[in-house]
Amino acid sequence: MLRPLLFSPAAVWLARALQEAGVERFLLLTDGASADDAAACFPPERTQVCTQQGPARAEAVRAFAAGQAGDVLAVLAPVWLSFSAAAALTAGEDCPCPAGVVRLSAGALARTGALPEPGPAEAEAAPLPEAAVLSGDPEELARVQELARMDFNRFLIRRGVRMLSPATVYIDPTVTVAPGTTLLPNVILRGDTHIGESCELGPDTMIRDCTLGEGCVANASQLNEAVFGRNVNIGPFAYVRPGTRVSDGCKVGDFVEVKNAVIGEGTKLPHLIYVGDSDVGAHCNFGCGSITCNYDGNHKYRTTVGDNVFIGCNTNLVAPVTVEDGAFTAAGSTITSTVPADALAVARARQVHKPGWAKRHREEP
């Protein structure tokens, strides 16, 4: 069940479908070598993981089944289930189990702790619509991945998510998307990602382990391990790296990279900007070509920018450095020391004219 299916192990896809069908308790049986992977990947809270064999495993199964009414579903093979198949499987005793799944009496299981071994009997079980046993065959895995992907997309569409081209959208089962959000073609959502209401994502956007508040727009961008407030405008061609927090109403524009930075409310990073290892206040504006120089080859240093700061085009902020509230930096400046509040910092060579130089230069042989 830890075999990858798109971005997540098969166990994650199965658990998501069963959770939606009303299943509340899970026991994951695995060996010691894969225990850490199993515990990390399996999403339901309070999932019990047993890595032991023999009598200890039987005791864990007995304890899990004790006090439960009805049946227990035992998954003996790496099975994928659609949402409709999971709902049918948990609906009642008359529903057939797919290959690799058996239904056991909770009372009997609590007494014996014995699970059947997977074998030909399970492989010949009555088929359930939209259920599949994953094999080691790459062609079969590709088929099941496509079934799983489209089933999850349909599930989100029924929940109020709009997709212009569901066949081009790839979403991990650990992702949540709020109603009213639109997913344009070629969107990939992975990992611990949560999208708020009324967002518009894509085209050509990948988001991994991020939280986006309501009303965000992300166009042709890649976002990783970051948190965005409400009404943030991202891209096109923005690259947001881990450790970033972007507040409400900000703009992270075209060809902008942000890494391990906090960006205050309403701040604009319009285009061709790098902000790394920085704390930026509210309502600032960074001109085109501005960068934070955060690395000296040995260590990373932080830059601090106050509220209502204007960073002129092609400004280099050489960390560690502070630009205080309300200050301006002149275009083309390299800032290496603190800029006082409400001051203008000019740090560039003075322009010098040499009359007639160009004419003489052109006349040289």
Image: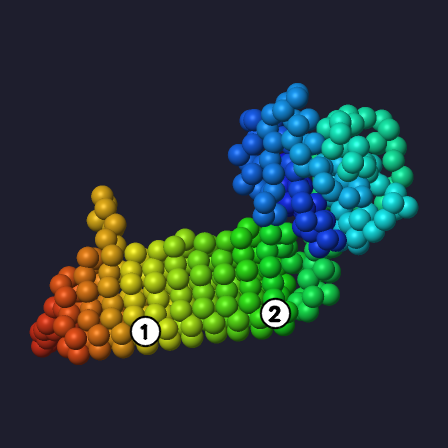
- Mark 1, secondary structure of its residue: loop
Q: Nearer the viewer, residue 249 or 47?
A: 47
Give the quadrant of the N terminus: top right
Residue nearest the viewer, comparing 341 with 174: 174
Percent coordinates x, y for residue 286 in the rendering: 31, 71
Q: Is residue 113 above or below residue 342?
A: above
Question: For the point 70% across and 59% down, which residue is it?
Answer: 153
Please provide percent x and percent y for residue 327. 20, 76
- Dot 2 or dot 1: first in sequence order is 2
Residue 20: where, in percent of width, then height? 71, 55
Are there few (<14), some (14-19), or many (20+) residues within 10 Å of tag 1? many
> x%, y% of residue 94?
90, 46
Closest to the observer, 20 or 165: 20
Mark 2 crowdedness (10 Å alpha carbons): few <14, some 14-19, many ≥20: many
Left or right relative to 65: residue 44:
left
**Any mark on residue 156, and which?**
none
Residue that label 2 marks: 181
Residue under the point 69% across and 66% down: 159
Residue type (three-letter) at the residue carrying disc 2:
Thr
Q: Is residue 345 left or right of residue 43?
A: left
Quadrant, the C terminus: bottom left
Q: Residue at x 48, y 74 (%)?
A: 231
| Any part of residue 312 in sight | no
Display colour scheme: rainbow
- Figure quadrant of residue 105: top right
- Say left or right for 64 vs 345: right
According to the picture, the residue beneath numbered tag 1 turns out to be 282
Name which quarter of the figure residue 103 lies in. Answer: top right
Asked whether 258 or 364 is in front, the reply is: 258
Q: Amino acid at mark 1?
A: Ala
Cα distance in 3D space between marks 2 and 1:
27 Å
Residue sitting at x 37%, y 73%? 265
